[in-house]
Amino acid sequence: MDDLIKFDLEEALDEMQRFLAQEHTIPSMNIAARMLVDALQHGNKIISCGNGGSLCDATHFAEELTGRYRDNRCSLPAISINDPAFLTCTANDFSYEDAFARYVEGVGASGDVLLAISTSGNSENVVRAVTAAHRKGMPVIALTVEGDNKLTRYADVAICAPCAPHSDRIQEIHIKVIHTLIHAIEVSMFGK
């Protein structure tokens, strides 16, 4: 068991180092952080979405902003599309592929930001949410994987984890990005 634990931790570290070494990582995260801060400073909100573990990450992002991350400060407007009644209603009446888009159509407004999360970059319900966000005048930040995928093509800024054999390594990068973006928001808006 010791060898397995050591292997897992070393593999995660290697993936983080690969992510940090990508030339677009820091500039993309900088742009994303500025987009989020700008939206919040102008009274707009952030809507986040994803499937499975990515939905958990989207929810974690929203709760850290509405609650707190490191320091006490005012609550910030962020919503994760995670209401099971809404999701099942929309999936039943329309389709699961339309669920996130319907929410963005109903709740999103020009100047809000959509944080779209998909480890493949091709989750149809997330892609349709991006399209709905653009129709509403909302910029889109994607957390996805490097390579040719729909989210990378359609987002205003894409933060791309290195390709990995399993999605857990991609999700580990995504949660680090989420924590860094929240930290950047708090420092930009409230100082240390």
Image: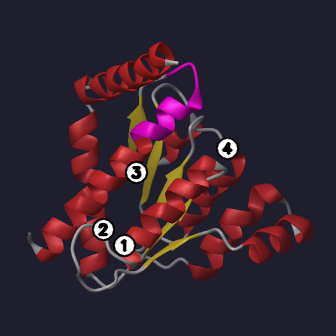
Direction from residue 36 to residue 60 in the image, left or right: right
Q: Which mark is residue 12?
A: none
Quarter holding the C terminus? bottom left
Residue 116, magenta (yes or no): no
Mark 2, residue position: 69
Question: Does 25 sit above or below residue 88?
Answer: above
* Labelled disc at residue 123: 4
User: Could you say which is closer to the camera, residue 178 or residue 150?
Assistant: 178
Residue found at the far right of this picture: 92
Colour pattern: secondary structure
- Distance CA(mark 4)–CA(mark 2): 28 Å
168 is within the stretch colored magenta: yes
Number of other residues with Cα within 10 Å of mark 2, as a class: few under 14, some 14 to 19, many 20 or more: some
Alpha carbon separation for disc pair 1 and 3: 22 Å
Task: Check if mark 2's residue and mark 1's residue have beta carbons within 8 Å.
Answer: yes
Label 3 and label 2: CA atoms lie apart by 26 Å
The image shows residue 191 at horizontal and vertical percentages of: 9, 72
- Of mark 1 and mark 3, the one earlier in the sequence is 1
**Amino acid at dot 3:** Asp
Amino acid type for the residue under numbered disc 2: Tyr
Kind of residue at badge 1: Leu
**Crowd around label 3: few <14 · some 14–19 · many ≥20 (10 Å):** some
Residue 65 marker: 1
- Judged by depth in the image, the label closer to the viewer, 1 or 4, is 1
- Tag 4: residue type? Ser
Label 4 SS: loop
Point out the tag, 1 or 4, that comes first from the N-terminus: 1
